[in-house]
Amino acid sequence: MTTTELDDATLVGRARDGDVRAYEQLVLRYQAPMFRLAVKMLNHRGDAEDVVQEVFLGAWRKLTQLQDDSAFVGWLYRSTANRCLNVIRARRPQVDVDLELAESPRTDGQPEHAAQVNGQLEALNAALQQLTPPQRVCWLLREVHGRSYDEIAEVVGVNPAAVRGRIARARAQLAEVMKPWR
Amino acid sequence: MAVNETGTDYELPCGRDLDALWDRLDSVDEHEATCPHCGTARESLLALRSATAELVAEPDPVPPGLVGRIMSAVRAEARRGQMLDLPTPEPGRVEVSEAAVAVVLRYAADSAGDVRARRCRVRTVGVASDGGGIVEVELTLAVRLGNVDGAETLARVRERVTTAAAARVGLTLAKLDLLVEDVYEDGE
């Protein structure tokens, strides 16, 4: 095969025919953004990995149901977002969470040092986990993944105005947390 | 975009909206330059913006082996399609899957230039005297935008695909339908 990067629609068309290598290219292309979304949603790398694996296996199985081949990415985002929300719903309430399950955020070096160097980033990561899951998914899709309001509306299944409202609330809440570091 | 779009509850004490402030964070107007509420809110939003940029730039390596695990699960249930008979001078049968034939035909179509093969349906309609299958193929294509002579391109695709079917697989093409369903631009 040539090394030219093929467009999504071409790869999806081939994958639907059973071309496993075409599908592999799609997995290579989109595993990183899906994993990132899942990690930020779930705050747990192991759970995120499970979600991404299910997303891509599920997408392969349902490839014949996809109407518009160029809509593949949106479809992946929707599947990832929904699976993450399901995982969160299935978790025990926060008060029951034991220390083993609550994987702490990455701590490289001493905490004080990390706080000085990455103060804002740490604060943002912590604040993200305080948002409601629907707010968090909307904010992440907009600010980290650069999706439009319309696309996010499709992904989460609410209208664009509601998406806008959720992101505004999320932003206000996050900005509030950013204050002490100024 | 409309600045004073309402619907959010984040009005500052001065009457300004947090969302509006966010939308034009880099262009401070007269009011914002002197208003303490706007000033504080802007600082928080700027801090949020730079922290968000850090978050986006933060390397977040995918666990090693994730692709491998996904692909082995996919391969385990790969759709091979129906099996097709190949000509053989030996007793017994040699079969090849429709999916494998499709890969060869798509590759042949790609080599014609200015097109990308997408879906490829292979259907057996009979058996030739040498025992090889006679097939009908439907091939869906995307054509490069700016491609000057479509008819010539398709003729080239037809020739490559027909040759590949006979020479590389050993199947006879009874019918080849080429469907152009899309265009693509260079670099896409």
Image: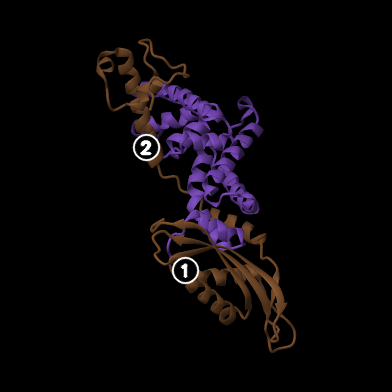
Residue at image x 54%, y 49%? A72
Where, quadrant-wise, is the C terminus of chain A in this rendering? top left
Residue at image x 59%, y 44%? A51
Mark 2: amino acid = Glu
Distance CA(mark 1)–CA(mark 2): 51 Å
- Work out whether residue A21 or residue A37 is closer to the camera in this orientation and state it: A21
The first of marks 1 and 2 along the sequence is: 2
Mark 1: amino acid = Ala
Residue at image x 30%, y 17%? B39
Chain bearing tag 2 is: B
Element marked by disc 1: helix
Instruction: Spot the brown chain and give its letter.
Output: B
Q: How is the image coloured?
A: by chain
Query: Residue B48: percent from the left, percent from the top?
Result: 38, 28
Residue annotated with mark 2 = B54
> How many C-alpha atoms fall within 10 Å of the one at disc 2: few (<14), some, or many (≥20)?
some
Q: Which mark is residue B151?
A: 1
Please identify the quarter of the rendering in which residue B120 is found: bottom right
Q: Which tint is chain A?
A: purple
Residue at image x 48%, y 63%? B116
